[in-house]
Amino acid sequence: MPENKHAGPGGYGFDARVAHPARVYDYWLGGKDNFAADRIAGQETIAAYPAIRASARANRAFLARSVRYLAAEAGIRQFLDIGTGLPTASNTHEVAQSVAPESRIVYVDNDPLVLAHARALLTSRPEGATAYLDADLRDVDEILEQAAGTLDLTQPVGVMLLAILHYIPDLDQARRIMARLVGALPTGSFVTISHAASDISPEEMAEMIKRMNRHLAEANHVGRTRDVVAGLFDGLDLLEPGVVKVTQWRPSSDVEAGGPTSLWGGVGRKPLPVSEVRGGTRRRPGPPRRGRTRTPPPRRCAWSARPCRRTPPGRPDGRWRTSNGRRATPR
């Protein structure tokens, strides 16, 4: 299911005669920033997969829950939202700044209409900041270079990749993009991904994607299986509950968890390198391991820094002697 986002391949220019993923998504959500070509594509995809509108809303809810978690529980204060899309409810900066007004957010897209709306409507609280970049998902270095004007990339960042990687049809290229992005992020950063599924309602989704691609300039929308989407988190520690339907990622209610969706989603954290962790292995945060006790240090006597030892067998006084033969009262 495409999101209202596209900072992906190809240079979608502004052409109202050709459907655009961001405007089709806007149509699914009931928005008004779309044209006849977008509405035709939207109607045809709804006919193939009637739950697509509910799935679009579920994706927005997943974005809000994941950003709220990162801001409120993980302490993230800066976000890089790649593939901003047309503004709607619960945008990244609104959720983050409702928790921490000082949060700084950079939005990235390469559609002129999206960027025009973003600059007009996605305005920051005075304590924080928002910025908008015209860049392509495939050019990670350019995105990071421009984002560094607003974000401190030596500190943890929350990267949002919602329904954008399924516009990279070449899986190897998608993996290279992720490897470059994750490699450039500081330890403690998080990456949130949602991705169209090929193994949820597979027949309906296959037809929906086929119809969507008939209307897109590049016909580059793909679905992928859960295992393949999980592989995109390589190099990250997945948070519980892992890669699941976006409705099932820490839902606010059982009703939300049971809602329809055609997207897999998850959140991963960049850990310390193994070489920087004592003992050469990483251990997940948690309570101390049971069944392991620390050996107490040897007793020290009052007059010597050397460990004391008990009086040889046969001595009834029960006193201690140092290794140099002196006698000491036990502590």
Image (cartoon, rainbow, N blue to C red):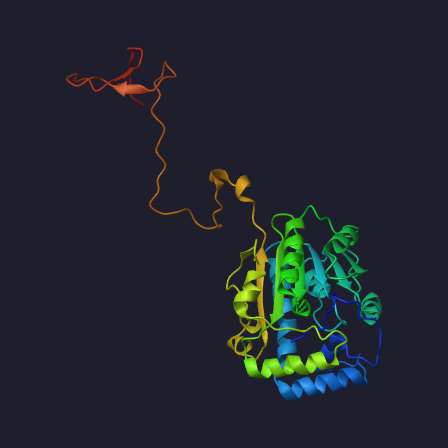
Determine the image quadrant of residue 206.
Answer: bottom right
Residue 133: x and y in percent read: 80, 60
Q: Quadrant of the C terminus?
A: top left
Q: Which residue is drawn at 53% across and 69% down?
A: 226
Q: Residue at x 71, y 75 (%)?
A: 219
100 shown above or below 204 = above
Left or right position of 32 against 60: right
Q: Which residue is drawn at 65% across and 62% down?
A: 174
Residue nearest the observer in this picture, 267 or 230: 230
Residue 167: x and y in percent read: 69, 69
Task: Point out the residue furthest to the left here.
Answer: 314
Q: Which residue is drawn at 62% across and 81% down?
A: 54
Left or right position of 56 against 327: right
Determine the image quadrant of residue 223.
Answer: bottom right
Say if residue 234 shows up in the picture.
yes
Say if residue 29 shows up in the picture.
no
Task: Point out the residue furthest to the bottom here.
Answer: 47
Residue nearest the observer in this picture, 124 or 27: 27
Residue 76: x and y in percent read: 65, 54
214 shown above or below 81 = below
Q: In which quarter of the image is the N terminus?
A: bottom right
Residue 274: x and y in percent read: 53, 43
